[in-house]
């Protein structure tokens, strides 16, 4: 089943909000995650225009970066980790 890009965008907005409200996330990690969110939004724009974004190296995929972040947040920020995990699944379903 393909995930609706609109739903992923809503989850990205939720992630931005959660990052903005969390004072415990380091500035470096916050910047990295927000950069990844921007990259995902660009990839979704490509999906909307029926373009396929170029595949990144396997170790640098958007889903890979998000998965690593989710692991970092599992204990300290479980809600944030859950949001990120949902994004990983949605991106996978879209082939991003």
Image (tube, rainbow, N blue to C red):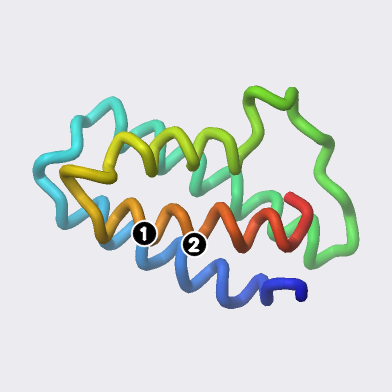
How many numbered dots are placed on residues in this image?
2
**Quadrant where the N terminus lies?**
bottom right
Q: Residue at x 75, y 29 (%)?
A: 56
Report crowding for label 2: few under 14, some 14 to 19, many 20 or more residues within 10 A (C-alpha). some
Whether 33 is drawn above or below 82: the answer is above
Real-space CA distance between mark 2 and mark 1, rounded to the nearest whole angstrom: 6 Å
Q: Secondary structure at mark 2?
A: helix
Instruction: Name the image quarter holding residue 15.
Output: bottom left
Whether 87 is drawn above or below 14: the answer is above
Q: Residue at x 28, y 62 (%)?
A: 17
| Place of residue 92 in the rendered image (x, y in percent of width and height, measured from the top left) | 69, 54
Give the left or right position of residue 34, taking residue 28 as reference: right
| Place of residue 59 in the rendered image (x, y in percent of width and height, measured from the top left) | 65, 23
Q: Residue at x 39, y 60 (%)?
A: 83
- Which residue matches tag 1? 82
Q: Residue at x 78, y 54 (%)?
A: 95
User: Farthest front residue?
Assistant: 75
Report crowding for label 1: few under 14, some 14 to 19, many 20 or more residues within 10 A (C-alpha). some
Q: Secondary structure at mark 1?
A: helix
Give the left or right position of residue 70, taking residue 17 as reference: right
- Which residue matches tag 2? 86
> Mark on residue 64?
none
| Place of residue 86 in the rendered image (x, y in percent of width and height, measured from the top left) | 49, 62
User: Farthest left residue?
Assistant: 23
Give the left or right position of residue 49, taking residue 30 as reference: right
Tell whether label 1 touches label 2 (CB within 8 Å).
yes
| Place of residue 26 in the rendered image (x, y in percent of width and height, measured from the top left) | 19, 31
């Amino acid at each position: 089943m393909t995930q609706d890009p609109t739903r992923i965008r809503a989850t990205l907005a939720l992630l931005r909000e959660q990052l903005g409200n969390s004072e415990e996330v380091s500035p470096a990690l916050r910047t990295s995650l927000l950069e990844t969110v921007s990259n995902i939004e660009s990839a979704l724009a490509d999906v909307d225009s029926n373009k396929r974004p170029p595949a990144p190296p396997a170790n640098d995929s958007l889903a890979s970066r998000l998965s690593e972040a989710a692991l970092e947040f599992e204990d300290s920020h479980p809600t944030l980790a859950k949001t990120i995990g949902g994004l990983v699944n949605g991106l996978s379903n879209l082939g991003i």
